[in-house]
Structure formats: C-alpha cells, structure tokens
C-alpha cells in the first residue's frame, strides 16, 4: 500500500491502486473504501486490532 501524507507529514490514509482500495485509520477505527468494477463503492468500518 502507498502512504498518503498531509503537509505536516502526518499519515492521512493508505491506498492500493491494484485493489482500488483506500484505508483510513483514525483513533483505532479502520474504514476501508473499495471501488468496485460496476462503478459502485463498498465501505466497511471496523475496530483496528492490535
């Protein structure tokens, strides 16, 4: 996965171009955003495990 950082060099999200996936983790909660072949978007929310 490729890291995306803001102007303060803080991690914003990670992207996987091959899987068309964006992963965002904020305060221990992980959100996965997946762009599907049919043009729709699948969003999953979960607590991040250690």
Image: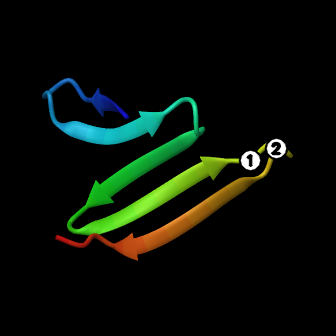
Q: Residue furthest top?
A: 7
x and y, in percent, of residue 15 in the image: 44, 36
Few, some or many residues within 10 Å of mark 2 (<14, 14–19, 20+): few
User: Is 45 situated left or right of 39 in this image?
Assistant: left
State which quarter of the image contains the C terminus: bottom left
Q: Taking 20 as reference, is 17 above or below it?
A: above
Which of the two marks, 1 or 2, is nearer to us in this view? 1
Q: How many marks?
A: 2
Q: Quadrant of the N terminus?
A: top left
Left or right: 25 in relation to 10: right
Residue 13 pos. (x, y %): 34, 42
Seen in the picture, residue 24 relative to 11 is either above or below; the reply is below
Q: Residue at x 74, y 47 (%)?
A: 36
Residue visible at 20% across and 23% down?
7
Task: Judge the density around disc 1: few (<14), some (14-19), many (≥20) Cα neighbours within 10 Å.
Answer: few
Q: Secondary structure at mark 1?
A: loop
Query: Mark number for residue 39?
Result: 2
The answer to the question of whether label 1 and label 2 lie on touching residues, with beta carbons closer than 8 A, is yes
Q: Residue 49: name its quadrant.
A: bottom left
**Is 40 or 8 nearer to us in this picture?**
40
Of 19 and 35, the residue lying toward us: 19
Which disc is residue 36 wearing? 1
Seen at 61% across and 50% down, the residue is 34
């Amino acid at each position: 996965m490729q890291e995306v950082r803001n102007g303060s060099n803080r991690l914003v999200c990670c992207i996987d171009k091959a899987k068309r996936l964006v992963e965002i983790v904020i305060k221990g909660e992980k959100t996965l955003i997946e762009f599907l072949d049919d043009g729709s978007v699948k969003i999953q929310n979960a607590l991040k495990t250690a």
